[in-house]
Amino acid sequence: MFVDPNDDKRENVDPKLGDERTTLISHLRWNRQTVELKCEGLDADQLARRCVPPSTMSLLGIIRHLAEVERRWFRLWMAGREAPPHFYSQADPEGDFDSAIADPEVVERSFRVWHEEIAETDKYLEETPDLGTAGFVPHEGPVSLREVLVHVIEEYARHVGHADLFRETIDGRIGI
């Protein structure tokens, strides 16, 4: 096991008979906590390591990318708030991954921004009880909060798989 079950700080994701909203938010929270767990105890060099050349993906890049996912889907497209990108630009569209460098200040900022975006998402979710609430995605059109939650859970789950492989490459730790 990656972590002894008695030392696992993640919240229980299995609401058993929870309603749809509780189930979706529980799975989102668990996936966030799993990404965090996969990064625990690593230094800046390890977090920024590109484990699968030629890909520029790294654990730090995943953190930065997921901050952008939370920002874009919830603050920008669902809440309709001004929310400029943190880590990429038109000139550097892969900046969330490509600029994830082994610098402690970059690591600290990346995790801080990710946690801030999670807090913004959680606030939005608390204030928006109806899963049918619609946002607007450019070039796609209206989208429900329900669909966005499923999409973002899928995005996290995909990157949890990457994080599993990266962590195993870095220090041999496996499992969830």
Image: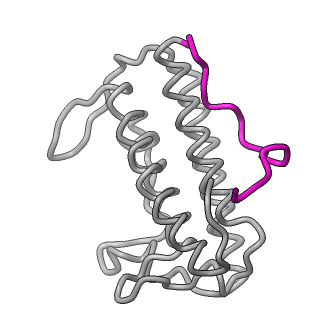
Q: Nearer the viewer, residue 105 or 48?
A: 48
Q: Place residue 89 in its image quadrant.
A: bottom left
Indicate whether residue 8 is drawn in magenta: yes
Direction from residue 50 to residue 88 in the image, left or right: left
Instruction: Give percent across and percent down for residue 65.
Output: 46, 63
- How is the model colour-coded? one colour
**Residue at the left extreme?**
139
Q: Main secondary structure of the magenta part?
A: loop
Residue depicted at 46% across the width and 16% down the height: 20
Q: Place residue 143 in its image quadrant.
A: top left
**Residue at the right extreme?**
6
Q: Nearer the viewer, residue 44 or 143?
A: 44
Direction from residue 31 to residue 116 in the image, left or right: right
Direction from residue 175 to residue 108 in the image, left or right: right
Instruction: Give percent across and percent down for residue 112.
Output: 69, 61
Query: Quarter holding the N terminus?
Result: bottom right
Q: Place residue 76 in its image quadrant.
A: top left
Identify whether 80 is placed above or below 83.
Answer: above
Identify whether 25 is placed above or below 163.
Answer: above
Direction from residue 150 to residue 12 in the image, left or right: right
Magenta residues? 1-18
Instruction: Give percent across and percent down for residue 127.
Output: 56, 21
Instruction: Give percent across and percent down for residue 45.
Output: 66, 87
Residue depicted at 56% across the width and 19% down the height: 22
Indicate whether residue 172 is drawn in magenta: no
Identify whether 12 is placed above or below 48.
Answer: above
